Structures are given as structure tokens and as C-alpha cells.
Image: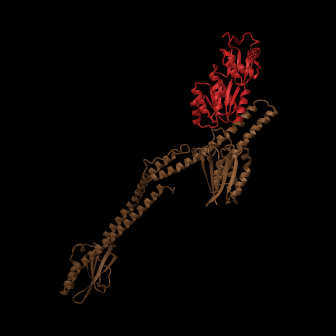
Chain colours: A red, B brown
């Protein structure tokens, strides 16, 4: 899942980014309102974490502008003000959630997961496909009662497929949602990671869950269902 | 309890009514008594003359013994009944009783003897029936040369029993009036204080949470309207003070939130898994920077609040303002040089008294702003002058200027002119401190600015 973080405090942006990336998210950073607005409008992301007090263009204006363009990307507002009126204004402008600085990092992660789930077809923290269980809170992946060990990138790929379960996901989608915008990408890399995943998830099991859709991409699906 | 207006009114009512009624009663009693005694005396005088004239007439015809006998034996009206309260008596100058009214004679009583007097003697005596008797005695010079004394008496019992009745009535009625007046007083007070109760219940609705509420003036008695008005003025002042405090608290907490968020996030993220010593060191460095930032904000807040509450005394010394400005220039020279900004200092030597450290901070702050918001290659000019009673320092820069509507706000705590211009350096407290120090010196600070051309800060200090 790719997250756009718009925060002008560089130190705060750095640690939030680190924390999110360690959880398997791909984070794009913007440090002022202009950059933030440009990236919000032009980068495919799954969530925007938006500070309100920003140089050049404030967060609420960015929010208003992207909502006006009909973009439905979930937005989590971050702010140093906790006046009720600010929360109301923020939510009414089109924010999906609101977090006041300073925040407990665990809460930020929980809200991020909840917002990502909201757009996906899955509504629970644990996603189940046949006997495969993906716990999005602690990143534990089990199949048939057996715990799998996945790398961060593998997990991010599996989680992305799981959120979009039963629908075809193109290679471009995968690139746009689990890689950084400026990563040097070889299109084979996706196939390589899909292979790694298949080895861990499907190899020892009779029923396969990851399927290739020729010419389109991949799908995570329980074929018996 | 004695502080209660109700009780005071009660006591005053009872006290005043007591005095009025006791006074009135006493006066009436006295007047009645005097009037009645006067009436009796007149009546006695009349009776005296009625009895005296036949005596004088008969004596002139040598019929005195006959007349005296008639007086003692022929019943005439009130004087005939035994101890009727109406008496007369004729005595010789030696005190011998010559004749007396049947009212005395039948009871074998006599009136006390008095000496010869040509003027009437009026006295109150204890009479034959143990009752008080008013006695009128006067001597008569008869034509045959004899002198007799005629005494006429009238019992005062009726008068005294009337007076006693009046006193009895007063003894019963006055306390009743006291009690009644007390209760009336209580009721009146209660009614009179009712508007006050309304007023206080309206005031009671105003609390810390709804300071924007005001005491409604309509429906209040006219006497309380000014009170309500002054109360409302006071509430307005309190509200303003409260909102300043609230704003300050909210601003201060806002400023502290960002560094706190940095510290909290580093703590949460870094402790989430095992790290290398290098990573821990880097995180602690960042946390340290955030802590320093917080310390700086807190220190500045403390300085301002101390200056404003006057808990740090200034250490006034004599100094030459031009010297102070030279020191300031030396301090900020490196940052001016790094932005290629030329600084100039002109003016005369002006001696003032002030806190040197504080004033150095004032001008350093102003100079830092003049450099920070200047264009590269710009200039800052300092002029020290004197315009009694003020010493004036003007700092003029060729910077970006301050929009007119922003000028009143630049001395507010945490205010940054360029919050939306990408520069958020500094705590936003610098000019607040400047203003606080200048005002602690009983000085003034003024700003003139033109956007795009530059600003002039004028600091006026008393000489």
C-alpha cells in the first residue's frame, strides 16, 4: 500500500515515514503544500496523511482541491490543534479521519489500516481466503494453521492482492501501490516476487490461491468458492 | 447573621417603631395628665368663687355664722354625698375648722390645714378616702375684718384611673405594634431584596464556561441597572483576560505539540524493534533536538510571563545607547555578512538608564528580523537620536515589509508573519519578548512598513 505523507516538519516526516515503511507501506513524502497538492493529484496512492499547517498551501485547501476533482483517496488529517471546531471543519471538508499531534504511533498505524480497509472489499483486520489467513495488524500470515515467514516486500504484495481479492490486479497496479514512485523498476521484478509468494503460500498445498491472468495480471482467489 | 440585611432591617424597624410609639405614648400621657389637671384646677377655681361669693356677701351683712352653718348642713349637689370626692372646708387662720361640706362632715373627715395666703395654693394631697385630692386654698378678707381660709378639693381618682387605663392600653398595644412592625419590616425587606435575588441568580448563571453570557438588564429594578451594567463591564474584562490566557495556552501547547510529536514518534518507532547502536544514536540526536526546541520555547514563555508579571527586576545602569547599538552590531555581524547585508549606525550619544542585557536582547532581536526578512545585498540602518523625554532608536531595513493588517499582530505571542511563506524559523516569541522588555522600561515600540520596500522599527525609551 502506498501512502502520501505531507508534513513540513522534516524530522517528524522522517520518523513517520520510517515507521510506516517498517510496517510494509511505501511512503512518498511532500514537505510543503504545493508539493503535497501536486503529488496528491498525480501519484496513485492508497492513503494521504495530511498535516493542516503547511507552508505555501494549507492542508485543508489541498483536501478541498482534491475532493473537488472527485478523488476519493482516504485522507487522514494530522494537526497540532485539537479544537473541536478544527476537527469538524476538517471532517466536513472531506477528511476521513483526524489525528492530533502528538500521537501514539500504534494509533496512527491502526487508523491507517482502518482507512485502507474502508476502501477495500475486506472489512476485518484478518483477511481470509480459503485456509489462508492474513492478519493486517501484526502481519502474521498462516495457511492451514502453519505460520509463514514473509519478507516485508512479499508481505506488502500479498496484502495488496488480499485487499483486492477476487479481482484482477495488473502489474502496473502493483508497481503503483507497493513501490516508490522513483524506484528503478524492471517489469520482471513483479513476476519474481509473485514466484517467491507462490513458493511460500501455494507450493505445499493442493489448491492454489495465486493465479496468473494472461495479458492482465494476477488474482488472489479461492477457486472452489 | 448580624450581617444579614433582613435582620438589620428587622432590628431597625422594631427600634424605630419602639421609639416612635414610646415617645408618642409618653407625650400623649403627659399632655393628657397636664390638660386634665388644668381643667380640674379651673373647675376648682370656679367652685371656690361660687362658694366664696355668698360667704363674702353674708359676712358683709353680719350673717357669717349663719352662712357657715348653711354650708355645713344644707346639701348642695356633689358636696352632699359622703366622700363623694368633692369637698370644701372653711378654716380660721389658726387652723380651726369653721365649716365643711357634708361630704366631709358625714364622714367626720377634714382637709389638711394650710396657712393664710392671698394667692391660691394648689396642692395634691391624700384625701379622706385615701384617694388623691386636688386642693385649692385661698384666704378671704371679709368686710368685718375677719380672715378665713376657704379650701375646695376635688378627687383625682377618676383622672388617675383614666391615665392608668391609657397606660394599660399602651402596655398591651406597644409590644404588639413592635412585633407587627418587625414582621412588616421583614416582609418589606424581603420584597425590597427580591430584585437582588433575581440579580444574583442571573449572575450565578455566569460561570467560567459561559463567560460570554451577560446579566440581562431588562426586568431589573432601575436601582440595579447600573450595578448590572458595571457587572457586565467587569465580566467583559474577565472574559477578555480569560480568552487571552486561553489563546496563550492554546498557542503554547500548539508550539509544544510538534516537538512532542517528534519525540513520541521516535520513541514509538525506534523501540518497536531491535536497532543498531548507530540507529539509536541518530534517534536520540533527533529527540535531543526536539527537546532543545521545547526548552527554548518554554524558556521564552517564562521570560515573557516574568517580564509581564514583573517578577524579574530590571538592573538599571547608566549607558550610552550608541554603545549598546555598537555591541548589537558586533553580535549580529556574522549573520549579516552571510546574507551580504550592509549595516549602518549613525546618530548621537544618548545616555539612558536601563537594563543593558535586556536592551541588548531587544535590539538583537529587531536586527535579526531585519536581516532574516531582508533581500540578499540589502541594508539595515540604525539611527540613534534624542527627542526629549525620549531616546529614539530606529532600525530601517530594505526587506520584504509587513502587510498593514499584519502589523498589529506581530507582537502577539507565537505570531509569525510568514506562516504561509515557508519560513517557520524561530519560536514566534521574539517580538513578544522585545515588547515586554521595552514596556518594562516604560518605553514604546512602533512599526512602519511598506510591503516590498522594508520596515522601520522605532523604539522609544525614556531618558
Q: Is residue A187 above or below residue B314?
A: above
Identify the residue at the far bottom of this view. B145
Of residues B192 and B109, the one nearer the viewer is B192
Residue B240 in sight in this render:
yes
Q: Quadrant of residue A100?
A: top right
Which residue is located at x 39 percent, y 64 percent?
B20
Q: Quadrant of residue A113?
A: top right
Q: Quadrant of residue A41?
A: top right
Which residue is located at x 64 percent, y 27 percent?
A40
Of residues A50 and A86, the one nearer the viewer is A50
| Apparent side of residue B189 relative to residue B91 in the rendered image (left or right) | right
Q: Quadrant of the C terminus of chain B?
A: bottom right
| Apparent side of residue B82 relative to residue B240 in the rendered image (left or right) | left
Q: Is residue B135 above or below residue B283?
A: below
Label count reads: 0
Residue A50 in sight in this render:
no
Residue B379, position as x, y percentages in the image? 67, 47
| Apparent side of residue B171 relative to residue A105 in the rendered image (left or right) | left
Which residue is located at x 77 percent, y 38 percent?
B285
Which residue is located at x 60 percent, y 47 percent?
B449
Residue A170, position as x, y percentages in the image? 68, 16
Q: Is residue A50 above or below residue B102?
A: above
Identify the residue at the far left of this view. B61
Residue A109, position as x, y percentages in the image? 68, 28
Residue A58, position as x, y percentages in the image? 61, 34
Identify the residue at the far front of this view. B377
| Apparent side of residue B17 relative to residue A166 in the rendered image (left or right) | left
Of residues B63 and B420, the one nearer the viewer is B420
Amino acid at each position: 500500500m502506498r501512502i502520501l505523507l505531507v508534513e513540513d516538519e522534516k524530522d517528524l516526516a522522517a520518523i513517520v515515514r520510517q515507521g510506516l515503511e517498517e510496517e510494509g507501506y511505501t511512503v512518498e513524502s511532500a514537505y510543503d503544500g504545493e508539493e503535497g497538492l501536486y503529488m496528491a493529484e498525480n501519484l496513485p496512492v492508497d492513503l494521504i496523511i495530511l498535516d493542516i499547517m503547511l507552508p505555501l498551501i494549507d492542508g485543508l485547501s489541498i483536501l478541498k482541491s482534491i475532493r473537488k476533482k472527485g478523488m476519493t483517496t482516504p485522507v487522514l488529517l494530522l494537526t497540532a490543534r485539537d479544537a473541536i471546531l478544527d476537527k469538524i471543519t476538517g471532517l466536513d471538508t472531506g477528511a476521513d479521519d483526524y489525528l492530533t499531534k502528538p500521537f501514539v504511533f500504534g494509533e496512527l498505524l491502526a487508523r491507517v489500516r482502518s482507512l485502507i480497509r474502508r476502501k477495500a472489499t475486506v472489512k476485518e483486520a484478518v483477511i481470509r481466503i480459503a485456509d489462508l489467513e492474513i492478519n493486517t495488524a501484526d502481519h502474521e500470515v498462516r495457511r492451514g494453521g502453519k505460520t509463514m515467514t514473509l519478507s516485508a516486500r512479499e508481505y506488502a504484495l500479498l496484502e495488496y492482492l488480499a485487499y483486492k481479492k477476487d479481482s484482477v490486479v495488473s502489474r502496473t497496479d502493483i508497481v503503483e501501490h507497493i513501490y516508490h514512485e522513483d524506484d528503478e523498476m524492471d517489469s520482471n521484478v513483479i513476476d519474481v516476487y509473485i514466484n517467491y509468494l507462490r513458493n511460500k503460500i501455494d507450493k505445499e498445498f493442493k489448491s492454489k490461491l495465486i493465479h496468473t491472468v494472461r495479458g492482465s495480471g494476477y488474482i488472489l482467489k479461492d477457486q472452489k468458492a | 447573621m448580624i450581617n444579614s440585611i433582613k435582620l438589620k432591617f428587622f432590628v431597625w424597624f422594631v427600634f424605630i417603631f419602639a421609639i416612635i410609639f414610646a415617645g408618642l405614648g409618653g407625650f400623649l400621657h403627659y399632655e393628657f395628665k397636664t390638660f386634665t389637671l388644668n381643667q380640674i384646677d379651673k373647675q376648682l377655681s370656679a367652685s371656690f368663687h361660687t362658694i366664696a361669693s355668698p360667704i363674702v356677701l353674708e359676712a358683709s351683712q353680719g350673717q357669717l355664722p349663719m352662712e357657715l352653718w348653711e354650708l355645713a348642713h344644707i346639701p348642695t349637689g356633689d358636696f352632699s354625698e359622703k366622700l363623694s370626692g368633692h369637698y370644701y372646708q372653711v378654716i380660721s387662720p389658726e387652723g380651726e375648722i369653721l365649716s365643711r361640706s357634708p361630704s366631709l362632715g358625714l364622714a367626720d373627715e377634714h382637709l389638711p390645714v394650710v396657712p393664710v395666703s392671698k394667692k391660691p395654693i394648689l396642692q395634691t394631697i391624700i384625701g379622706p378616702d385615701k384617694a388623691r385630692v386636688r386642693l385649692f386654698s385661698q384666704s378671704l378678707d371679709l368686710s368685718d375684718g375677719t380672715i378665713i381660709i376657704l379650701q375646695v378639693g376635688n378627687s383625682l381618682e377618676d383622672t388617675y384611673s383614666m391615665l392608668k387605663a391609657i397606660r394599660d392600653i399602651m402596655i398591651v398595644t406597644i409590644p404588639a405594634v413592635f412585633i407587627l412592625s418587625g414582621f412588616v419590616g421583614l416582609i418589606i425587606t424581603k420584597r425590597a431584596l427580591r430584585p437582588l435575588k433575581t440579580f444574583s441568580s442571573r449572575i450565578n448563571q455566569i460561570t467560567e464556561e459561559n463567560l460570554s453570557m451577560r446579566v440581562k438588564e431588562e426586568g431589573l429594578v432601575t436601582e440595579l441597572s447600573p450595578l448590572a451594567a458595571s457587572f457586565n463591564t467587569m465580566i467583559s474584562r474577565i472574559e477578555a483576560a480569560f480568552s487571552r490566557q486561553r489563546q496563550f495556552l492554546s498557542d503554547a501547547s500548539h508550539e509544544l505539540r510538534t516537538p512532542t510529536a517528534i519525540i513520541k514518534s521516535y520513541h514509538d518507532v525506534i523501540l518497536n524493534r531491535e536497532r543498531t547502536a548507530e540507529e539509536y544514536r541518530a534517534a536520540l540526536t533527533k529527540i535531543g533536538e526536539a527537546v532543545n526546541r521545547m526548552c527554548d520555547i518554554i524558556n521564552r514563555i517564562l521570560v515573557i510571563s516574568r517580564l509581564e508579571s514583573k517578577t524579574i527586576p530590571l538592573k538599571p545602569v547608566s549607558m550610552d545607547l550608541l554603545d549598546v547599538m555598537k555591541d548589537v552590531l558586533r553580535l549580529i555581524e556574522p549573520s549579516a555578512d552571510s546574507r551580504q547585508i550592509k549595516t549602518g549606525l549613525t546618530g548621537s550619544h544618548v545616555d539612558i538608564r536601563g537594563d543593558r542585557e535586556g536592551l541588548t536582547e531587544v535590539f538583537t532581536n529587531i536586527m535579526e528580523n531585519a536581516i532574516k526578512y531582508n533581500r540578499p545585498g540589502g541594508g539595515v540602518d540604525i539611527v540613534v537620536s534624542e527627542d526629549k523625554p525620549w531616546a529614539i532608536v530606529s532600525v530601517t531595513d530594505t526587506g520584504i515589509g509587513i502587510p498593514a493588517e499584519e502589523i498589529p499582530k506581530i507582537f502577539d505571542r507565537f505570531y509569525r508573519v510568514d506562516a504561509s511563506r515557508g519560513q517557520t524559523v524561530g519560536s514566534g516569541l521574539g517580538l513578544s519578548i522585545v515588547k515586554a522588555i521595552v514596556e518594562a522600561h516604560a518605553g514604546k515600540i512602533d512599526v512602519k512598513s511598506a510591503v516590498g520596500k522594508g520596515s522601520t522599527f522605532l523604539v522609544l525609551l525614556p531618558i
